[in-house]
Image (tube, rainbow, N blue to C red):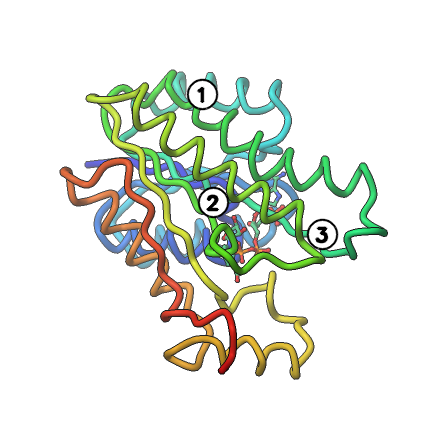
Amino acid sequence: MKTVFISGASRGLGAVIAKTFASNNYNVIINYNNSEHEANDLKKFLESNYKIKCFLYKCDVSNEFEVKDMFLKIKGEIGNIDCVINNAGISLDNSLIDKTYDEFMKVISVNLLGTYLISKYSLEVLKKGCIINVSSNNIYEGSYIESIDYDASKAGVISLTHSLARFLAPNIRVNAVAPGWILTDMTKDLDLNFKKYEEDKILLKRFGKSEEIADAVYFLASNEYVNDCILRIDGGIRWILI
Ligand code: NAP
């Protein structure tokens, strides 16, 4: 039986990715930072609905000491794993001028440094298999003035994906998804006019469901010839409305 590690899987897209892999017979390691209650509920849900084991590890992906310690524990308690998904991410929207040093550093630390730290220390237990990074379609021409730090972090994740694919081949494949808008906690408080404006740019005229992104992540894990691939999944975007 295969085992997948998912960062930031207590809620949102990560929790749905956990369900998708569990439904495909993977044991699931859920990493969370603050949402312990949600992580416990997800573990109960997965173990009662699928014939799999679920493990919980609390860790801030941007803290090197915690990440290193987590993978040493995983090595001792679980052993080798087959797939690592770098999903944990935050956005701290603020205008270009008002954005603070601390905000910028926090976003880069969780989204970009966290992806690097998890990838690096997971090699303790990921000897053969794959890494899948969650980037964003903001890396294309559609960046936003409130989220230049987030957009830069997600562009960095794409660069990391290419570098890791090159340097970890042939034993480990490395791919990324670049989702557009997804209905999760991260987007639930968007202004309704802004949401409508964004939906109008999407050829399918709606935000994506987490299940649709999770299916794409599972595809990247299960097709063993896909490598160094950035899978854009956003319903088709026209950035300029005409
Ligand atoms: P979300 O609903 O806000 O959930 C974020 C998850 O990340 C939570 O499980 C949270 O865990 C975890 N997390 C945050 N900081 C962490 C840290 N320092 N260490 C460990 N875990 C941490 O966000 P989402 O929408 O599901 O986003 C998931 C991924 O998809 C992110 O990388 C995001 O950038 C990307 N994405 C989202 C969208 C979108 O429209 N929603 C679009 C493109 C890409 P705790 O609550 O336990 O702290």
| Three-letter residue code for mark 3 | Leu
- Compared with residue 211, is residue 38 higher up or lower down, i.e. above or below? above
The residue that mark 2 highlights is: 87
Q: CA distance from mark 1 to mark 3?
A: 26 Å
Element at badge 3?
Answer: loop
Q: CA distance from mark 2 to mark 1?
A: 15 Å
Q: Label 1, secondary structure: give it.
A: helix
Q: Disc 3 designates what residue?
A: 92
Q: Is mark 2 within 8 Å of ligand 1?
A: yes
In this picture, residue 123 sits left or right of residue 104:
left
Q: Residue furthest front?
A: 242
The answer to which image quadrant residue 236 occupies is bottom left
The total of numbered circles placed on residues is: 3
- Comparing labels 1 and 3, the label whose residue is closer to the camera: 3
Report the residue at 49% width, 82% height from top. Answer: 242
The answer to which of marks 2 and 3 sits earlier in the sequence is: 2
Residue 146 pos. (x, y %): 71, 57
Residue at (26% x, 26% y) in the render = 172
Q: Position of residue 189 (x, y in %)?
A: 67, 71
Beta carbon at label 1 within 8 Å of ligand 1: no
- Taking depth in this image into account, of 28 and 103 the one nearest to the observer is 103
Which x, y percent locates residue 181?
Answer: 50, 66
Which one is earlier in the sequence, the residue at label 2 or at label 1?
A: 2
Q: Nearer the viewer, residue 160 or 15?
A: 160
Q: CA distance from mark 2 to mark 3?
A: 16 Å
Name which residue lies at 30% across and 40% down.
27
Inspect the image, locate mark 2, and give the three-letter code of the amino acid beneath it: Asn
Coordinates of residue 15 in the picture (x, y in percent): 45, 54
Q: Which residue is mark 1?
A: 120
Q: Report the front residue among 185 and 208.
A: 208
